[in-house]
Image: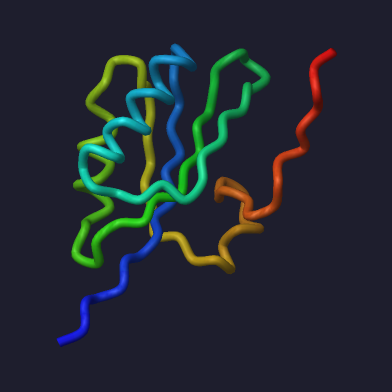
Amino acid sequence: MQPRQRRSVSVVATTSDPFDGIVRLVLDAARFGFGLDQVSMMTRSDGGRTIRMVLDVQPAADCADIAERLSRHPAITDLHVAEFAREDSGRPGAVSLEPANERMLP
């Protein structure tokens, strides 16, 4: 019997502490055995931070269970998990597959 393919989920989280929030999400993803495909953080107009991740998870993993596991830290103020398909990458709220518009600091 062939092993089942892993699937991708999109995680969008809001954090009150950017360092604590992103570190805890990445460490928990590793601890739960998820693969990390993409991660980015953006500052919103209100000063809050949004973390976007694409995780590779087991085929039987439930999005609600993943959300419950990842949202347990006080630094995470809101978190949503949804199925992610490569064609979703252009949709608002999905993690882009394109490189970020980066700028080098002097």
The quadrant the N terminus occupies is: bottom left
Q: Quadrant of residue 89?
A: bottom right
Task: Check the image and name the residue furthest to the right.
Answer: 106
Question: Does residue 62 appear left or right of residue 96 in this picture?
Answer: left
Name the residue: 37% across, 22% down.
77
Name the residue: 54% across, 22% down.
49
Question: Does residue 45 appear left or right of residue 63 in this picture?
Answer: right
Q: 35 and 83: which one is in front?
A: 35
Query: Where is residue 4 shown, x and y percent of the image?
Result: 24, 76
Query: Where is residue 70 shown, x and y percent of the image?
Result: 27, 34
Query: Where is residue 32 shown, x and y percent of the image?
Result: 21, 43
The quadrant the C terminus occupies is: top right
Q: Quadrant of residue 26?
A: top left
Query: Where is residue 9 shown, x and y percent of the image?
Result: 39, 55
Total marks drawn? 0
Task: Check the image and name the residue furthest to the left.
Answer: 1
Name the residue: 21% across, 37% down.
69
Q: As displayed, is residue 94 above or below residue 3? A: above
Q: Quadrant of residue 40?
A: top right
